[in-house]
Image (cartoon, rainbow, N blue to C red):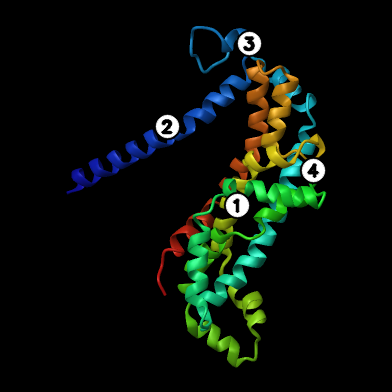
Amino acid sequence: MTQSWTFGRVFRLTLLILGALMFLAPYIFMISTAGKDQSDIFSASLSLIPQHFAYMANFTKALTRVSMPNLLLNGVIVCGLILVLQVVVAVPCAYAMAKLKFAAARILMAVVMLGLLVPIHATALPLYVAFDKLALLNSYAVLVAPFSISVFGIFLFLQFFRAMPDDLIHAARLDGMSEAGIVARVIVPNAWPAVTAFAIFSVVAHWNDLFWPLIVVTNQSYATPPLGLLFFRAAEAGDDYGALMAATLIITLPLVIAFLLAQKRFVEGITMTGLKG
């Protein structure tokens, strides 16, 4: 029995390690390439350890050829504004559909499900025309406004709120709280795992988004991190892959750090949204 349990555990750990290495392989390759010069990158060998360490030169290029601090700041501003607006809109909507009884609840739920099927690519052209008419291109508003309502966020919070006990809300109503007070003082404090999980999804999606910024931004002052990489590649004539990987590493590092710090809450939010109340 003990030997069988030990073998099963070793087998599972081996599979997990192999899976982790498979997913980490591109990032490990990026770290390796960021420290190589051109001769190492285009050599016949595929050694991960650079023969000539060029980390200092490549990172210097990444930080000076484009305004890397400005790119990171733009990413923080855009992703932060989008996340705040999405949570402010999604939490009350999900609470209303999960805990309030009204005639249009099923219709709204159907609308949310349909909204999950509509990609940004389908609405890009009319949105571009509308923002062009409003003279909002090359601004934070055009980067934030189309994503201020997240149907995925509403769906995620809806599943989470359904698992919350109704007695908690009834007790708050008996204490004289309004529905807005219940959302602010009861629902939100108990929904931090779901908020954290959604924050990871939202920030990663919009930090890495290139499609929409590429359409609506031509001014480098408003460039987001992925769009900044295109400007950097243009400045480097597109062939300095060591410096390009160094710039990519700088841009992706904040996401890795944020996920490592929030991974416990992220797992809690994902597992709890699958519960049924």
Mark 2–mark 4 Cα distance, whole angstroms, equals 39 Å
Mark sitting on residue 95: none
Q: Tag 2 or tag 1, which sits nearer the N-term?
A: 2
Relative side of 162 to 83, left or right: left
Position of 176 relative to 45 (above/below): below
Q: Which residue is mark 4?
A: 138
**Amino acid type, label 2:** Met
Mark 4–mark 1 Cα distance, whole angstroms, equals 22 Å
Relative side of 246 to 140, left or right: left
Q: Which residue is mark 3?
A: 38
Q: Which residue is mark 1?
A: 202
Q: Pointer 2 and pointer 4: residues touching (CB < 8 Å)?
A: no
**Residue plotted at (68% across, 21% down):** 243
Mark 3–mark 2 Cα distance, whole angstroms, equals 26 Å
**Amino acid type, label 4:** Asn
**Residue plotted at (73% across, 52% down):** 130
Q: Which residue is mark 2?
A: 22
Tell which tag, 4 or 1, sits nearer the viewer.
4
**Amino acid type, label 3:** Gln
CA neighbours of label 4 inside 10 A, class few (<14), some (14 to 19), many (20+): many
